[in-house]
Amino acid sequence: MVIILSLSQEEKRYTYADYLTYPEDERWEIIDGVPFMQAAPTPIHQEILMELSKQIAVYLTGKSCKIYPAPFCVRLPLGYEKSATAVKNIVEPDISIICDKSKIDDKGCNGAPDMIIEIISPSSIKKDRFIKFNMYEKAGVKEYWIVEPDQKLVSVFLLQKNERYSRPEMYTDEDGINVSIFPDLIINLSAVFTPNQA
């Protein structure tokens, strides 16, 4: 479940400075200055998150790219902010993969990850499919996955030379996915969607 705080155009747009004041035991995102409180994830969400993270982490062992599962703060500056705390897009993707170490600091990631995976719930479909899709595309995230636990489906979007996402490649629990940014990594979706039986 996502809780949206109501804002009129005349009211304050929230920033990273506000995000830093939120309680540590709550998960918040700010998108275009509008805060969203994240609900606690379901068990199946966490099982999928753990299996995806495991497969990717094993592959990345000894490599320069790193995987960061949620909760992990990603700031997406637009380039015109007057200060680091003025950023109005702060998200906590389910999985972030980052290859540029200069983007990592003690607060999380400042700039676009190379790859983001979001595991959707009924309450987050609009945000993940449209709002975050457009934001990640604009920020330059090279590969964006949307995982649908109920349908056992993964949509993969790849950033093209025109800086727009391609049409989605769709995968089911019977497939393996070749990760675009790591051509020799294949994610076993059977294990992802039935983690206790794999």
Image (cartoon, grey):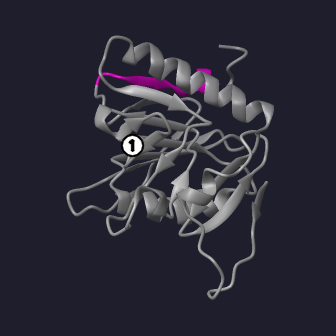
- What amino acid is found at the position of numbered circle 1 in the picture? Pro
Q: Residue at x 31, y 32 (%)?
A: 101
Secondary structure beneath label 1: loop
Q: Which residue is mark 1?
A: 113
Q: Is residue 40 shown left or right of residue 178? A: right
Please name the residue shown 68% across and 85% down the image: 8
Instruction: Give the total number of marks visible in the rendering.
Output: 1
Instruction: Give the percent coordinates (x, y) of residue 24.
Output: 71, 40
**Residue 114 shows in the view:** yes
Quarter of the image where one finds residue 41: top right
Give the residues in magenta: 184-192
**Quarter-wise, where is residue 178 in the image?**
top left
Q: Residue 1 appears at what percent x and percent y?
A: 79, 54
**Position above or below: 15 against 115:** below
Q: Residue at the left extreme?
A: 161
Question: Is 53 located above or below residue 113 in the figure?
Answer: above
